[in-house]
Each structure stands twice: as C-alpha cells, then as structure tokens.
C-alpha cells in the first residue's frame, strides 16, 4: 500500500498492515478477556514474583508464544516454496529473506534457548532439593532481559524493518554498506539484551548446582538433567560473551563507521570465526539439556535407573568440551586450508562417539524395563530415531570435502532441523507434559498429547526428510524460488504439506492447554510414580518446599524410599535458603533497556540517554532496596 | 538457630556467582584482545607507536594500580569494623580511580583532536573498543563507590560488608585487566 | 500439462539422478564417493539403532501382565559399553581417512599443469563475471573445454558469494579481499546449472549462471570470437 504523507511517499507492504490489523484487533480482545476473567492479579503476581517455578513458567509461556510466531514464519516460507516460480503474497526477494532470518533467529534465541532455561528453572532446584535458585532476583532479571530482547526483535516486523541478513549475519552483508536502515540493528540489540539474560541464567544455574544441593546429594548422585544443566551453563559462559563482543564489533561497524568486517582492511571471515565460536557451542547448549530431560524421562517411564550413569555424565562433559573445538566445520568452503579443514572435520566426527554412548545407554535403559507409553515418554521415544538420523547426517557434513557439496544446501537445512527439532523441541514438549503438574498443578490430557505427538512427528518427517534429497539435487538454502527444471518440486510440495501438519498438531497442543485449564481437576501428588526429588513434594509445590532438607544417600532416593517404605530422612539445619521477594525493579530495568535499544536502533541520542539513565538507576535502587536487608537486620539483632 | 549463618551462606553463594560473572568478563576481554592483536599493527593509517606516549600511560597506570592498594586498606577496616578506615579507603580509591579516568579521557581527547577517530583504521577501532570498554568499567566502578559510601551508613553491617567485598573483587579484576592492556596494547609499541 | 508431468516424474528419477551424485569431474566423483561412503556407514548405524529400538520398545512395553513389576536395578555393562565406544571409532576412522585424503586433494590448487586454463570468477550483487586469460569477459555464462584442467580464481567485489555447479564439483566461497582457488577438470560435454550458494542479499536466489562444457575446438573458436 502506498500513500503520501507530508509530501513523502510512504509504502507499507500489505503483510505489515495485516500484522498491525491483527494486533489491533487481537490485543483488545485479549485484554478484555483478562479483565473479565479477573486474571490481572494473577498476572501481576507472576510478573513480579522471583520464585523459580513462576519465573520458569513465564520463560516457557513466552518461548511457546515466540514458537508460534517463528512457526508462522516457517509456514509462510513453506507456502512460498510450495511450487516452482510461485508468487505467494509479498514473500519474494526481500520479504522472504526477512522470513528466514526472523524464523531462524527467533527459533534459536527466543524459543530453543529460553524454553530450556524455563524447564531448568522449574525442575532443577527441586531435583536437587533446593528451595529456590541461588539468586532469585537475578533470575527475574534474566527473564525480563530475554523478554525484552525477544520483544525488540519481534517488533521489527511491525515497523516494516525485520532483519534480513540470515541468522548467521555474515559480514560484510551485515554491515551498513550492504544492508542499510534499522533492520539489522534490531537483530544486534535484540540478541545483545537477551544474551545478557542468558548469561545471568547460566550463572544462576551454576551457582545453584554448586552450592544449594541437599545434604548428601553428591554430584555423583545427581539426576542427569541437573548435570546437563551444569555443563550447558559452562558452555553458555564461554559462548555468549563471545557473541556479545561480536555483536558489539558489528555495532561499531554499523553505527560508528568502524571496519572490522568490511572493506580492504577488515576481515569478513573474522566475523564467521566469532559467530561460530559462539554458534557451534550454542547448538549443544540447546541439545544437552534436551539429553538430560530425556534421560530422566526414559528412566522414569521405564521404571528403571539410568543405564551406565557414569558414562552418561562423562559423555555430557565430553560433548561439551569437544563442542568448543569444532566451530570451523561451518566454514569448510571458506578456504581455510586443508590442515584446518581436516582438523575440524576429525574433531567433529569425534563427537559422534560420546553421543553414541548416550544413545545406546538410553536404549539399554529401556531394556528389561516396563515402558509405559504416556505422552512424555512418546516424545522421548520419537526423539531417539529422529535425533540419530540428524546426528548421522551431521557426521556426513563433517566430512570436509563432501561438505563442499552439502554446504548451504537444503541438506544442511534438513540436518539441523532433524537434530534441533528432534532433540530440543521434542524435549521441550516432553518436559512440558512431564512437569506440568509442577508448574501449574494440573496434568495435561494424555490422549490429546498422543495426537499432538503423532501428528507432529509425522508432519516433521514429511517436512524435512525429502529436503535431504532436494539438497543433494542442488537446491541452495535461503532461496525464495526455484525452477521446474531443478527437479525439486515434489520434495518441496510434500515438505510444505508436512509443515502444515505440524502447524495443525500445534493447534491440538493449544487446545490441550486450554482444556486442561478449564477443567478444575488438580493433579495428584507424584503423578508419574517418579524417581527424583521433585516428585516427593505436593503439586504445585509451595514456595519453599524443602523447609526440612532431605538427606540423600543414593541415586533416585525418592524411588527407593517408596520401594522400601521408608521416608527420606530430613534435617532442619542445613543452610540458609535464598530470599525471594516480589519486585518490580527488573521490569523497570528492562523498560530502560528497551528504550536504550530503540535509541540505538534508530540513532536517537536523547533516547539512548533516557534509556541509559533508567537502566543505570536500577542499580542504585537495587543497592538500597536489597531483598536480603531485613533478614540481615534480624540476624544482626539476634547476634547483639 | 540457623539465622546465624544466613549471611555466611548467602555471601558464599554470591561470591561464587560473582566469580563466575568475572569469568564471563574474562572471555569478553579475551575476545577483544584477540581482535586487537589481529588488527594491529595496521596496514595503513597511524601506527600505535606514533600515538602512544610513555607519560600518560605510566601516570594512568600508577594511579589505577595504587587504587587497588588503597582499597585493601578499606578492606582492612572492614575486618575490624573500623568504618572510618573503610570510608577513607573508599574515598582514596575513588580519587585515584578518577585521576586514572582523567588521563584516559585526555588520551582519547588528544587522539580525537588529532583526527585519529574510530573509523580511521582497524587498529584504532579495536583500540577504542577495548580500552573504552575498560574505561567504562572504571567509570562504573567510580559510580559504585559513591553508592558504597552511602550504603555504609544505611545497610546492616553484614550486608554492607558483602557489598564491599564484591566491589573489591570487581575493582581488583579491573586492575588486572589494565595490566594486561598495558602488556598487550601499550608496551609492545612503546618499546 | 508439461509442468505437472515434471512433478510426477521427479520421485521416479530422484534416486539415480541427483545432481551432486552424478558428477562430471574426477574431483566431483571423489566427493560423491565420500557422500556415498558416509551414507553407507551411517545407514549401518541407523539400522543398528532402529533394530534395538524396535526390539526394546516392543518387547518391554507395559502390558496388563507386567504392570506392577519392578524391574531389576542395573548399573551398566562394561562389555557392552566398550563395544559401543570402539565400534563407532572404527567406523569413523573408515570415514576420516578418505576425508583427509580428498580434502588435501581439493585444496591442492597450486600444482596445476602448464596448459591449465585460468578463469577469473568475480561474484558481485547479483551476477557472475567470468574473465578468460585473453581478456574475454562473459556474464552469467561460463564456457569450458572438455577434458582440460581449469583453475578458477574466485573473487568478490562486494559481499560473500559462493561458486557452485552441483554437477561439476562442490562449492567454494568468493570472498572480497581474499582470492580462493578451485581446480577441476570437467569431462563430459553438456549444459549445467550454476548457482550462488552463499546468501548475498535480495536477489541471491536469482544469482544463477549456466555452465557449458564444449569440445576443445569449439571452445577455441568461442574464445576467439568477439571480445
Ligand atoms: C541441536 C543442534 C545440533 C546438533 C546436536 C548438531 C550435531 C552435529 N552437527 Fe550440526 N548443525 C546445527 C545444529 C546441530 N548440529 C545447525 C543449526 C547447523 C547449521 C547452522 C547454519 O548454517 O545455519 C549445523 C550445521 C552443521 C555443519 C555445517 C554444515 C554446513 O553448513 O556446511 C556440520 C559440519 O560438520 C555439522 C556437524 C554436526 C555433527 C558432526 C554433529 C554431531 O554432534 C552429531 C552426533 C550424533 C550422532 C552421530 C548420532 C548418534 C550416534 C551414534 C548412534 C553412534 C554411532 C555413530 C557413528 C559411528 C557415526 N552440523
Ligand atoms: C529451534 C530451531 C528451529 C525450529 C524449531 C524450526 C522449525 C521449522 N523450520 Fe526452521 N530454521 C531454523 C531453526 C528452526 N526451525 C534455522 C536456524 C534456520 C536457518 C535460518 C537462516 O537461514 O538464517 C531455519 C530455516 C528453515 C528453512 C530454510 C529457509 C531457507 O533457507 O530458505 C525452512 C524451510 O522449509 C524451515 C522450515 C521450518 C519448519 C516448517 C519448522 C516447523 O517445525 C515449525 C512448526 C511450528 C509451527 C508450524 C507453528 C505452529 C503455528 C500455528 C499452529 C499457528 C497456526 C496459525 C495459522 C495458520 C494462522 N526452517
Ligand atoms: Cu551471490 Cu548468493
Ligand atoms: Cu556446528
């Protein structure tokens, strides 16, 4: 749509208009519904609470919302690609490029990463017998940073300025010489803000696991999800700071005329190194927690302990370490030379060994067990073959010379959707079904869960299996168009149908959530006949479920206490619990950062100053309104 | 009664958390050091040897490094609850830090006046980002000290002590980074 | 309609005619060999996993009979664990050795024979320029003599592109400020699709070119014709 305003010709694409319209219509309806149902107090309670279970629930809620947004991007892409030389709506050229950029970025940063952090929030403290995370306030801050970053990125579309440089932001395309306008600044600041939140979450998880375990719960007795969380946090602490600096350098290129990645003197390839030093560990950051979740679920629903526990822990650690050393396998076509290429090729292949150990241990956990096919277990079962198929194509990619054919083709697209959807997304669904009683105190419908699972899985394989062949037949990624002669029509057609099926299965999931909440039935305690500590407490758990600390002397303590009919011994006096108090400060901080980011994105200095002052003043407020003040005062009085 | 150990337990958590945070900073600065090394010396434009001066570098370093010493003084006061010493230590540290910032800003100002700005060449870009990030850490520390000064009056002693300790780690860390900056950024091109 | 005919035909042709698996050069054939080899090894892995998976899920699923059983505690099994650690290592060695050999071979672009043809390939948003040694320049059309070694000198004037003729050989990036080389000998006459494989902006999808491999004589004539 075009019109003139103040003598300027203004062009607004119809998709943006449609976006605004649906927001303008949808938002009032949602607000009205909330008011009518008297949900505002609940929302306020969640928005200000620093309790780990509530923060975790928020993380998951918003990640799922972002999943729908990024999923709609995917459906639009698939619709544009459904036939050769298709002209679907506006999604050719620039608009298509925006689609895959926002799809990929959102899925990785605002879906996969935070949804797992959300599940960690919900489950990890309870699994190790802690009352809360070590830093409840920081936890809420982390969540708000994620939400703010996600919102900044999300809003880009509404200003007709969605980023368009691919989620990898390769320079020099990503510098201001080739992509002008605010579009890609949204990428930089969205990721910068949320990345900081991820770092905080990792610090919090790590401290919690190191310091807050119940007495007797040695590291060697810890369930595997906390173990995965620990290693993941370590990876985050290495990967995300590198991303932060890479983005900072890119920001200087884009906004202040530096030329780190551009021109005669800059090194475009340096960006690729920085990005993948972050990016490769990132894919294990989203895979390892998924492995942890599946280990717990498979063991629980087979009613057996995890097979080869020590090997499982060692392989998590090994995958983490190796994961730090293989980044250049994304750069086999850059021409880094045969030494570098073969080194990274062999290092990448090595990761198959610890991953294989995990796969076989999962299989042998099920052997001689009693496998109960509830929804969470179905997702875990779907994961094993799906992930293995994705993993082995990864090994094919890591063969450097062969990767010259695979690279940047749909073969790669197929590979990473197999591993990511196979591990992270299936694990998130599994985790949501599994821990729903802990999050909300209700149980999702198992039958609908099974429908969700089967349709999603079938749709998934329909979408991505044939993409291997499309890639081998020469279809590059990130193209909005192909010809009849390319001979990839059938693959794309079936692939698009599969994507719609996946979308449909997500509607079933929505319906499931909706139905469960209309139903007033509460979940019973220990609904899955659990093995780990989080099931030893009422559902939903009270704020401080372990007032009396359980004393642990073996793995799967709760299970054995049920088998042997002897309650878990407890102690009164282990250590102080973190102090959690509702607070609005994180909200204020994120408002400041939001304003600051928009100031940078559009280059308005007054706005940068305003936002900067707001953000910095949060530090001052926090310095004098520390939630621990009263507790320390009390202690002081008692000591006098 | 367990409340006796609240402050100990929670401080222990916080210390670990903060150390992990410092590790994050280490990774960030390492990336910037790598960037600096990659782009320096530059192929065109001013060479670092032509810009850096012994005088400002040494003066700035003296001020910043001695500020770590005065902070130790303050910490000593903390241990025997001598608030006077604590405040004096913070005050001195603040002044020394501010003096460092004076030289830092002078140096930036001089370069910019001479026309050596961020976009001049990649050596200068990475120099500004790296040294600038360090300078903003020092500035943040200065603001933090003002707050700490007031906190000493209004917070329960144990909480103040905790905040003071955390600040110490931060300030010493920023100092160590400066030493590495000296070794990587300045000295090779001054000699 | 002819177009719908193509739609139906593809699944029948696909298995045997995928472009990357039907290369027209030695180097491309090496890469196709690697793809096939790794595919074979991987199929073995997938098969093993799937067999165990089906076996266990069918055999040990919950039934009315075993509903209340408590499975025995099982720490692990040393022998099994050793097997599934060493077996993958062996498979990987089998893949790593040819990978290393072929990776060194494709990267060895300097030792080209005397009469090798040198072509400058310049990527720019959004077209390809091919410059021959005699100064002849073409856009989006690359003509090569059959059975003669060619060395491509890849360059870019703006952002990163990637030179890819799926049936010839794997891709190599064209990076501004850094020359990359790719050496190959096409040995089958014909017309082939070429593509830009690195995302390079709005018209990335349209940055295609045609590669024609022609007999030596024809090539000489073409090269001499109008500059
Ligand atoms: C969850 C995320 C995830 C995971 C777990 C993996 C896992 C692996 N990935 Fe993948 N990868 C991505 C996400 C992921 N990847 C993404 C997002 C990209 C593209 C980014 C972009 O460009 O946009 C990518 C791209 C990518 C490339 C670059 C391709 C290219 O652009 O040219 C390569 C190359 O080496 C690669 C390799 C691997 C390998 C070797 C593994 C291994 O870890 C797999 C190990 C697992 C198994 C092998 C299966 C189980 C093992 C057994 C059953 C034992 C026996 C097995 C053998 C003997 C083989 N990946
Ligand atoms: C967590 C990671 C993740 C996940 C889960 C997904 C999920 C999906 N992805 Fe994505 N994808 C990436 C990460 C991910 N992707 C990345 C990193 C890239 C690379 C980007 C780049 O090149 O820069 C990519 C690229 C990518 C491409 C290649 C684009 C190109 O190169 O041109 C395609 C094409 O088919 C695709 C498809 C899909 C589909 C169909 C899904 C499906 O699984 C999605 C299923 C979900 C839904 C369908 C949502 C449900 C929504 C509804 C039910 C709403 C219904 C409402 C209405 C219909 C009104 N993805
Ligand atoms: Cu040039 Cu893509
Ligand atoms: Cu990788």
Image: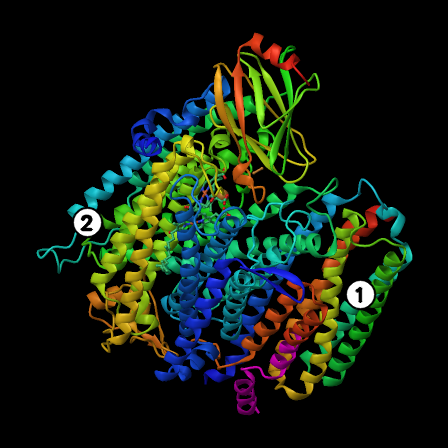
Query: x, y percentage for residue B81?
Result: 68, 84
Q: Is residue A447 left or right of residue A206?
A: left
Query: x, y percentage for residue A120?
Result: 41, 64
Residue pictured at 87% horizontal, 52% vertical: B52
Q: Which mark is residue B45?
A: none
Report the predominant secondary structure element of the magenta stretch.
helix
Residues flagged by tags 2 and 1 on a common chain: no
Residue pictured at 48% horizontal, 23% vertical: C192
Mark 1 lies within 8 Å of ligand 4 (Cβ measured):
no
Of all residues, the one furthest to the left in this rendering is C65
Mark 1 surroundings: few (<14), some (14-19) or many (≥20) residues within 10 A: many
Q: Is residue A251 left or right of residue A562?
A: right
Q: Quadrant of residue B29?
A: bottom right
Depicted A422 relative to depicted A434: above or below: above
Question: Pointer 1: what residue?
Answer: B64
Residue pictured at 56% horizontal, 54% vertical: A163
Q: In this view of the protein, which residue sits in the foreground, C96 or C114? A: C114
Q: In this view of the protein, which residue sits in the foreground, B154 or A256? A: A256
Q: Which residues are magenta?
A: A616-640
Chain under label 1?
Answer: B
Q: Quadrant of the C terminus of chain C?
A: top right
Residue A476 in view, yes or no? yes
Question: Pointer 2: what residue?
Answer: A368
Depicted B109 relative to depicted A616: above or below: above
Query: x, y percentage for residue A462?
Result: 31, 44
Q: Secondary structure at mark 2?
A: loop
Give the Cα separation between the discs numbered 2 and 1. 66 Å
Q: Quadrant of residue A490?
A: top left
Q: In this view of the protein, which residue sits in the foreground, A348 or A2? A: A2
Chain under label 2?
Answer: A
Residue A633 within the magenta-colored segment of the rendering? yes
């Amino acid at each position: 749509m075009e019109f003139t305003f103040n003598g300027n010709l203004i062009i607004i694409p119809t998709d943006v208009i449609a976006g605004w319209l649906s927001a303008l219509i949808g938002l009032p309806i949602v607000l009205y519904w909330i008011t009518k149902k008297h949900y505002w107090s609940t929302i306020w309670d969640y928005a200000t609470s620093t309790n780990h279970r509530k923060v975790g629930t928020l993380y998951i809620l918003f990640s799922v919302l972002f999943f729908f947004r990024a999923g709609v991007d995917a459906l639009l892409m698939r619709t544009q690609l459904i036939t050769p030389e298709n002209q679907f709506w506006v999604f050719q050229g620039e608009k298509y490029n925006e689609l895959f950029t926002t799809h990929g970025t959102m899925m990785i940063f605002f879906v996969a990463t935070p949804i797992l952090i959300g599940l960690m929030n919900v489950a990890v403290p309870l699994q190790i017998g802690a009352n809360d995370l070590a830093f409840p306030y920081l936890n809420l801050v982390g969540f708000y940073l994620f939400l703010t970053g996600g919102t900044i990125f999300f809003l880009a579309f509404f200003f007709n300025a969605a980023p368009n440089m691919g989620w990898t932001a390769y320079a020099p395309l990503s510098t201001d010489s080739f992509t002008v306008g605010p579009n890609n600044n949204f990428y930089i600041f969205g990721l910068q803000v949320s990345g900081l939140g991820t770092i905080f979450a990792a610090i919090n998880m790590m401290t919690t696991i190191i310091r807050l375990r119940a007495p007797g719960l040695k590291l060697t007795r810890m369930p595997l999800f906390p173990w995965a969380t620990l290693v993941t946090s370590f990876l985050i602490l290495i990967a995300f700071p590198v991303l932060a600096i890479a983005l900072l350098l890119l920001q200087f290129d884009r906004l202040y005329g530096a030329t780190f990645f551009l021109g005669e003197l800059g090194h475009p390839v340096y960006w690729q190194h920085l990005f993948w030093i972050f990016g490769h560990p990132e894919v294990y950051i989203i895979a390892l927690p998924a492995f942890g979740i599946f280990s717990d679920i498979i063991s629980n629903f087979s009613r057996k302990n995890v097979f080869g526990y020590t090997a499982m822990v060692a392989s998590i650690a090994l995958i983490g370490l190796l994961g730090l050393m293989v980044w250049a396998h994304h750069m086999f076509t850059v021409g880094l030379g045969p030494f570098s290429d073969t080194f990274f090729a062999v290092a990448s292949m090595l990761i198959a060994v610890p991953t294989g150990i995990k796969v076989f241990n999962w299989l042998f956990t099920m052997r001689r067990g009693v496998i109960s096919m509830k929804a969470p277990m179905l997702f875990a079962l779907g994961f094993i073959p799906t992930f293995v198929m994705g993993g082995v194509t990864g090994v094919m990619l890591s063969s450097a010379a062969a990767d010259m054919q695979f690279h940047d083709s749909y073969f790669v697209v197929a590979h990473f959707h197999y591993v990511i959807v196979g591990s992270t997304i299936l694990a998130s669904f599994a985790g949501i079904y599994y821990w729903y009683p802990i999050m909300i105190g209700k149980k999702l419908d198992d039958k609908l869960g099974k429908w969700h699972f089967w349709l999603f899985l079938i749709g998934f394989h329909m979408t991505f299996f044939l993409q291997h062949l499309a890639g081998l037949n020469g279809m590059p990624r990130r193209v909005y168009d192909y010809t009849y002669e390319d001979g990839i029509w059938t693959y794309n057609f079936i692939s698009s149908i599969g994507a719609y099926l996946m979308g449909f299965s997500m509607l079933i999931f929505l319906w499931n959530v909706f139905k469960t909440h209309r139903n007033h039935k509460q979940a019973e305690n220990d609904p899955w006949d659990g093995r780990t500590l989080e099931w030893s407490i009422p559902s939903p758990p009270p704020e401080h479920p372990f007032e009396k600390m359980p004393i642990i002397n073996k793995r799967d303590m709760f299970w054995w206490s049920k088998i042997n009919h002897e309650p878990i011994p407890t102690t009164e006096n282990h250590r102080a619990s973190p102090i959690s108090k509702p607070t609005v400060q994180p909200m204020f901080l994120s408002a400041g950062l939001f304003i600051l980011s928009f100031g940078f994105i559009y280059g308005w200095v007054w706005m940068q100053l305003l936002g900067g002052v707001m953000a910095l003043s949060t530090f001052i407020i926090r310095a004098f309104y520390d939630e621990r003040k009263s507790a320390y005062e009390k202690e002081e009085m008692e000591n006098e | 009664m367990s409340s006796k150990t609240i402050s100990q337990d929670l401080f222990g958590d916080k210390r670990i958390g903060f150390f992990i945070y410092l590790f994050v900073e280490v990774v960030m600065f390492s990336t910037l050091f790598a960037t600096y090394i990659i782009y320096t010396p530059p192929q065109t434009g001013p060479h670092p040897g032509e810009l850096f001066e012994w005088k400002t570098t040494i003066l700035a370093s003296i001020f910043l490094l001695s500020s770590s010493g005065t902070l130790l003084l303050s910490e000593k006061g903390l241990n025997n609850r001598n608030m006077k010493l604590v405040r004096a230590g913070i005050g001195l540290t603040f002044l020394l830090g501010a003096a460092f910032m004076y030289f830092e800003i002078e140096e930036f100002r001089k370069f910019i006046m001479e026309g050596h700005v961020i976009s001049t060449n990649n050596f200068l870009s990475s120099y500004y980002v790296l040294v600038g990030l360090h300078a903003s850490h020092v500035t943040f520390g200065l603001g933090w000290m003002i707050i700490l000064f007031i906190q000493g009056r209004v917070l329960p002693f144990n909480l103040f002590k905790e905040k003071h300790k955390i600040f110490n780690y931060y300030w010493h860390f920023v100092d160590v980074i400066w030493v590495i900056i000296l070794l990587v950024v300045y000295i090779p091109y001054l000699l | 309609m002819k177009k719908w005919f193509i739609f139906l035909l593809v699944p029948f042709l696909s298995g045997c005619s995928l472009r990357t698996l039907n290369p027209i050069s030695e180097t491309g054939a090496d890469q196709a060999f690697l793809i096939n080899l790794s595919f074979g090894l991987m199929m073995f892995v997938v098969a093993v996993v799937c067999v165990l998976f089906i076996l266990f899920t069918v055999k040990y699923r919950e039934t009315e009979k075993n509903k209340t059983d408590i499975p025995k505690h099982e720490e692990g099994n040393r022998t099994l664990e050793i097997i599934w650690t060493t077996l993958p290592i062996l498979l990987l060695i089998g893949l790593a050795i040819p990978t290393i050999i072929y990776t060194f071979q494709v990267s060895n672009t300097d030792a080209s024979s005397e009469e090798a043809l040198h072509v400058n390939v310049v990527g720019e948003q959004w077209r390809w320029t091919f410059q021959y040694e005699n100064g002849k320049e073409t856009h989006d059309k690359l003509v090569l003599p059959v059975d003669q070694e060619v060395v491509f000198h890849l360059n870019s004037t703006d952002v990163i592109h990637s030179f890819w003729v799926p049936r010839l050989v794997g891709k190599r990036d064209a990076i501004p400020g850094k020359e990359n080389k790719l050496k190959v000998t096409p040995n089958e006459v014909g017309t082939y699709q070429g593509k830009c494989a690195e995302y390079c902006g709005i018209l990335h999808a349209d940055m295609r070119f045609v590669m024609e491999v022609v007999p030596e004589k024809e090539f000489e004539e073409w090269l001499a014709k109008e500059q």
